[in-house]
Amino acid sequence: MPFPTESFDQVIATFPSEYIRHPATLSEIYRVLAPGGELILLPVAWITGRGVLLWFARGLFRITGQAPEWNPGYLVPLKETGFSASTQVVELPSSRLLYVRAKKMDRSS
């Protein structure tokens, strides 16, 4: 990334593709984050509302892989890069969102 080292307090990615877990991508994100900075990810959301259109969208998302089951192994590359990672599920009226919060840890300790 064409940014100076430690130039951001946060990096945010919503519905990123698999590139986000690639070691080179995570290393660059780690590099541009300031000490104690955070990577915030919204990797997946599930439609939970009722109604014909929501039912159809939920089925379509399942078929196309846009609403996969959550796999905790998703956090492994983050931790291997030096992030302290945690997840939080947020329930909304018609959907459920999964947030990943990855804090930049000091690699020297």
Image (tube, grey):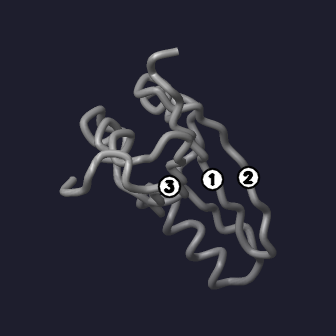
Within the image, what quadrant is residue 27 found in? Answer: top left
Is 12 positioned to the left or the right of 49 in the image? left
- Identify residue for label 2: 89
Q: Distance between the residues labelled 3 and 1?
A: 17 Å
User: Of helix, strand and loop, which one carries label 1?
Assistant: strand
Residues at discs 2 and 1 in contact (Cβ within 8 Å): yes
Relative vertical location of residue 108 with respect to residue 6 in this rendering, above or below: above
Q: How far apart are marks 2 and 1 (CA)?
A: 6 Å
Amino acid type of the residue that numbered disc 3 sits on in the rendered structure: Asp
Q: Which residue is drawn at 52% across and 53% down?
A: 41
Front label number (2 vs 3)? 3
Relative vertical location of residue 35 with respect to residue 84 in this rendering, above or below: below
- The image's mark for residue 99 is 1
Amino acid type of the residue that numbered disc 1 sits on in the rendered structure: Tyr
- Identify residue for label 3: 9
User: x, y percentage for residue 42?
Assistant: 55, 57
Q: Which residue is drawn at 42% across and 29% down?
A: 77
Question: Which of the pair 38/71 is nearer the observer?
Answer: 38
Amino acid type of the residue that numbered disc 2 sits on in the rendered structure: Val
User: Of helix, strand and loop, which one carries label 2?
Assistant: strand
Residue count near mark 1 (Cα–Cα under 10 Å), binned few <14, some 14–19, many ≥20 = some
Label 3 vs 1, first from the N-terminus: 3
Question: Which of the pair 8/43 is nearer the observer?
Answer: 8
